[in-house]
Amino acid sequence: MSDAKYSNPIEIEITEPSRLNEQAAVALVIAGALVAVADRHVSPVERDEVIRFIRDRGLAPHISDERLFAMFDELAERLEEPDFANVVIDTLRPVANMPLSSHLIELSERVAAADEDVHPHEVQAIKLLRLLTLVLPRAKQVGPGAVNTAPKE
């Protein structure tokens, strides 16, 4: 696979199951990264916790640790920008139909506790993730299996 495909994981269009798996991995990583950057200090133990969580649950066996680390670093940097909320929403929206909510919340809580100091901003980040997992609009299916349910004119 080319590096261009992974240059911006947030913009990957879901057109096949392997892309959906990639989007799920990105959603998990962004949940951890959001909490890690919330206190303005990303600890290596927080990043390690994200990868450990994903590996322990077998949630992204198709993605190497190196790729997950790179994803985390890229997304953590992106989350320091003023439009961080859009980045989170755009990353979570494509996987809104997947049963990831409990994993996203558990991962975010584990990252907050990883450095043994749960900062109030980390708690706010977890609350934001909880809210987003409840209210995000469901993803529209794209590709050969898509069904158009709109009324014909």
Image: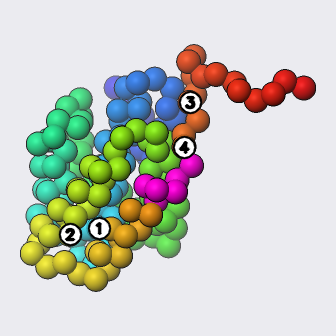
Return the residue at label 2: 112
Mark 4 Cα-neighbour bin, 10 Å: few <14, some 14–19, many ≥20 = few
Nearest to viewer (mark 3 / mark 1):
3
Counting residues from the N terminus, which is met first, the one under dot 3 or under dot 2?
A: 2
Q: In the orientation shown, which residue stands out farthest toward the right?
A: 153
Badge 1 vs badge 2, beta-carbon distance below 8 Å = yes
Residue 45: where, in percent of width, then height? 11, 64
Mark sitting on residue 141: 3
Counting residues from the N terminus, which is met first, the one under dot 1 or under dot 2?
A: 1
Mark 3 Cα-neighbour bin, 10 Å: few <14, some 14–19, many ≥20 = some
Which element is circle 2 on? helix
Q: In the orientation shown, which residue stands out farthest toward the bottom?
A: 120
Return the residue at label 1: 35
Mark 2 Cα-neighbour bin, 10 Å: few <14, some 14–19, many ≥20 = many
Nearest to viewer (mark 2 / mark 4):
4
Q: Find residue 57 and report its image quarter.
A: top left
Badge 2 vs badge 4, beta-carbon distance below 8 Å = no
Which element is circle 1 on? helix
Q: Find residue 58 and report its image quarter.
A: top left
- Compared with 69, 21 (above or below) is above
Residue segment shown in magenta:
132-137
